[in-house]
Amino acid sequence: MRAQPPATAGASDKDHAVRIMKRGPRRIVLTLGRCLKLRCPACGRAPIFGRPFNVKVHCTACGVVFKREEGFFVGAIMANVGATEVLILLVYLLSLLLTNLNEQKMLTALFVVGLTFPLAFYHHSWSFWLGLDHLIEGLSREERSQ
C-alpha cells in the first residue's frame, strides 16, 4: 500500500489535490532533466539503477522509495512498448518516403529497431515513470529506524 502524505489540519482532499498539481514549469523541467540523467527525481543526487536493469529500492541520498508496490511499473512497460511502436512506425514511413528498400530489407531493419530500442529505452522509461509519479503524487520517504 502506498504511504499517503500527512494531512494538514483542516485541509480537504481538494486542497491537497490542488497543492500537488501546482507544479511550475521550472520544477517539471528539473524533474524531467533528472529522469533523463537516470537520477533520483526528488533530489537528483543518486542514480535510480544500481546495476543494469535493476531499480534500486530507495535513493541513497534522500531516502525516497523507488521500488513501489507490485504493478507500479506496468505503466513504464506500457510506455516503452508504445514508444517502440511509434518509432517503428516512423522508421517505416520514413523508409517508404526516403528510400527504395525492398520489402525484406525494410522488415529486417524494422525487426532490428523493434529488438534494440526497447532495451535502449528501458532505463529511461522506468525513470520517467518514476518522475511522473513524483510530479503528480510526490515520492514517499523510506522509514528509517532511529
Image (tube, rainbow, N blue to C red):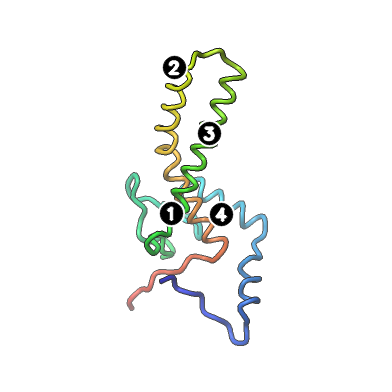
For residue 107, above or below residue 33: above
Amino acid at circle 3: Leu
Amino acid at circle 2: Gln
Which label belongs to residue 74? Answer: 1
Q: Which of disc 4 and disc 1 is earlier in sequence?
A: 4
- Foreground residue among 146 and 96: 96
User: Is disc 1 placed on a helix, strand or loop?
Assistant: helix
The quadrant of the picture occupied by the N terminus is bottom left
- Foreground residue among 7 and 116: 116
Give the distance between the C-alpha atoms of the residues marked 1 and 3, in whole angstroms: 20 Å
**Residue located 52% across and 40% down the image:** 83
Q: Which of disc 3 and disc 2 is earlier in sequence?
A: 3
Q: Which of disc 4 and disc 3 is earlier in sequence?
A: 4
Amino acid at circle 1: Val
Q: Which of disc 2 and disc 1 is earlier in sequence?
A: 1
Q: Where is residue 47 in the image (x, y as percent from the top left)?
A: 41, 51
Residue of label 3: 87
Mark 3 surroundings within 10 Å by alpha-carbon count, few (fewer than 14), some (14 through 19), many (20 or more): some
**Residue located 53% across and 33% down the image:** 87
